Amino acid sequence: MTSRPKLATNANFARGLGALALFAVLAGAFLLTEFGPAAWYPEGASVTAGIGYALFDMSGQTPLIDTGFLAAFETVDFVLVAALVAAITLARKDGGEA
């Protein structure tokens, strides 16, 4: 059985004010920065179509820049995720407890 969390009464307000000040600085930097157009992204090109063409190594079909290694990257990604899931499964305790 779990119990309710206790409210901290000895809070340090300096840390909270520091976090709010950092948030204000980062929000101001993000909102006031002028981002120019992407130099590599042509007008009217579809990112989804570009990913599909890159996955099947059809780089001549899209105006987007690609390296032709997307399928290899996805294969390695799938193998690493499977290895991670297998490692977690093997590391679990007996009896199904986490």
Image (cartoon, helix red, strand yellow):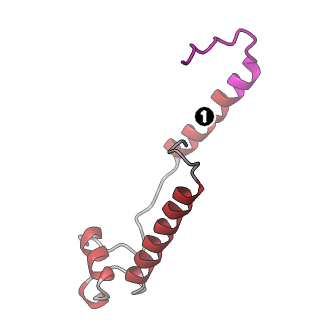
Quadrant location, the C terminus: top right
> Furthest residue to the front?
95
Magenta stretch holds residue 17: yes
- Compared to 25, does 91 lie above or below? below
Q: Position of residue 71 (x, y in %)?
A: 37, 81
Specify the quadrant of the image occupied by residue 26.
top right
- Compared to 35, does 54 lie above or below? below
Q: Position of residue 69 (x, y in %)?
A: 42, 85
**Disc 1 marks which residue?**
23
Closer-to-camera residue (39/52): 52
Q: Which residues are magenta?
A: 1-18
Please report the residue visible at 34 percent of the width from the left and 79 percent of the height from the top.
64
**Residue 20 shown left or right of residue 71 in the figure:** right
Q: Position of residue 90 (x, y in %)?
A: 56, 59
Please report the residue visible at 69 percent of the width from the left and 23 percent of the height from the top.
17
Closer-to-camera residue (31/47): 47
Amino acid at dot 1: Phe
SS label for mark 1 = helix
Specify the quadrant of the image occupied by residue 50.
bottom left
Please report the residue visible at 39 percent of the width from the left and 87 percent of the height from the top.
68
The majority secondary structure of the magenta stretch comes to loop
Q: Position of residue 14 (x, y in %)?
A: 76, 21
**Residue 44 shown left or right of residue 55 in the figure:** left
